[in-house]
Image (tube, rainbow, N blue to C red):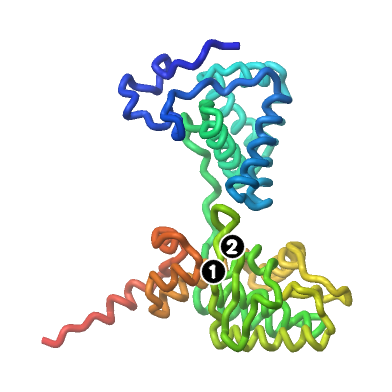
Amino acid sequence: MSSPLNPHNLPWVSDDRAEQPSFRNRRFNLSPVPLQFPSLSHADEAMERLYTRGQAIEGLRPATIRWLRDGYRSFRSFLREDAGRETTFLGGDAVKQVQLMEDWIAWLRIRGVSRTSICTYWRGLDALFRRLEETAGMFNPCTCLRPPKASPPLPKALTRDAAEKLLHRVRNLPWQTTFERHRNLAIIGLMLLAGLRKGEVLKLTVSDVDLDAGTIRVERGKGKNGGKDRTAYATPQLIVLLGQYAEARRRAGKTHPEFLSSASSANHGIGEVTIRRLFKLLSREMDMRLAPHMLRHTYATLLRQTGVADRVAQELLGHSSLAMLQRYSHVFDGECATEASRLHLDF
């Protein structure tokens, strides 16, 4: 194995250690030790301990653990393809590790992996290595490279006209049953008119929805330590949609605890496949790419356009900061001109 890493010998580190926070262990305020393991199986065991710790200590959700696993599996496959890569990376030479990270990105591109997937793999591996740095003091080679950029983003939010068109289309499509129509309107309404995430919609139970109070209890939403609880408030239109669905659910004899039911005769809730198929169908009908999180962005934008105060919108969306809210709220062409024209002086 190589000798212990000396940051002073690395070309990207200046003599002023105080100006290089990425080379200081955040927990112990010490120089990092080399990222090295006797074998790939030892590295696998270390990663498994990080997954377990993430669930037990950080309260990471299964989806986040899968994201971390996917990033590591992709990089592991790259190392396993060539015994020389595996030996070199596990040896602990920081300069060679950084070079291998670049080679990994090139390897993914040659195989036709999308820019978005490459960015996702990178971020997952970086998050895993950061946890290794924090718990074991090991050097994270990702800190020495610029992360790959994802593909140009799709439109993050719908305009008001497009949102209205979407609800109209869901209401009037020839669904197989009336129950399916009301159920799908409830799914879209929860995302578009209450800002719920896909996972939050799937986890809703009957007891979480109080139509009399117009409230929707969201337990363990996105966030650290198992997720943040919040209360979402249904608009009058959403209360109508949910009420119609609740009545259809009662008539269909659905008694399971999940709020959203399968359209089949089975007595159980829906899964991710149901939402995936719904959005695939609606994307085709609307002639545009639709995604569940796009409706949450639309909800944030509509709140701003309606004049809802930022602090209130922050609470409704369950954001921890106003900065995050600003990332969700979007300004469309023509809005600036419209708002500017409202300024009037009497002279």
User: How many residues crowd around disc 1 within 10 Å: few (fewer than 14), some, or many (20 or more)?
Assistant: some
Of the 4 image quadrants, the one containing the C terminus is: bottom left
At 67% from the left and 18% from the top, the residue drawn is 38
Q: Position of residue 277 (x, y in %)?
A: 75, 66
Asked if disc 2 and disc 1 are in contact, CB closer than 8 Å, the reply is: yes
Outermost residue toward the left in this view: 347
Q: Position of residue 333 (x, y in %)?
A: 41, 70
State the SS at label 1.
strand
**Quick one: 334 or 122, which is closer to the camera?**
122
Q: Position of residue 193 (x, y in %)?
A: 56, 77
Residue type for callout 2? Gly
State the SS at label 2.
loop
Marks 2 and 1, Cα distance to the nearest angstrom?
A: 8 Å
**Quick one: 32 or 106, which is closer to the camera?**
32
At 66% from the left and 46% from the top, the residue drawn is 65
Residue at numbered disc 1: 230
Residue at numbered disc 2: 221
Instruction: Name the N-terminal-most of marks 2 and 1.
Output: 2
Asked where in the image residue 180 lies, by quadrant, the reply is bottom right
**Quick one: 2 or 340, which is closer to the camera?**
2
Residue type for callout 1? Arg
Asked where in the image residue 201 lies, by quadrant, the reply is bottom right
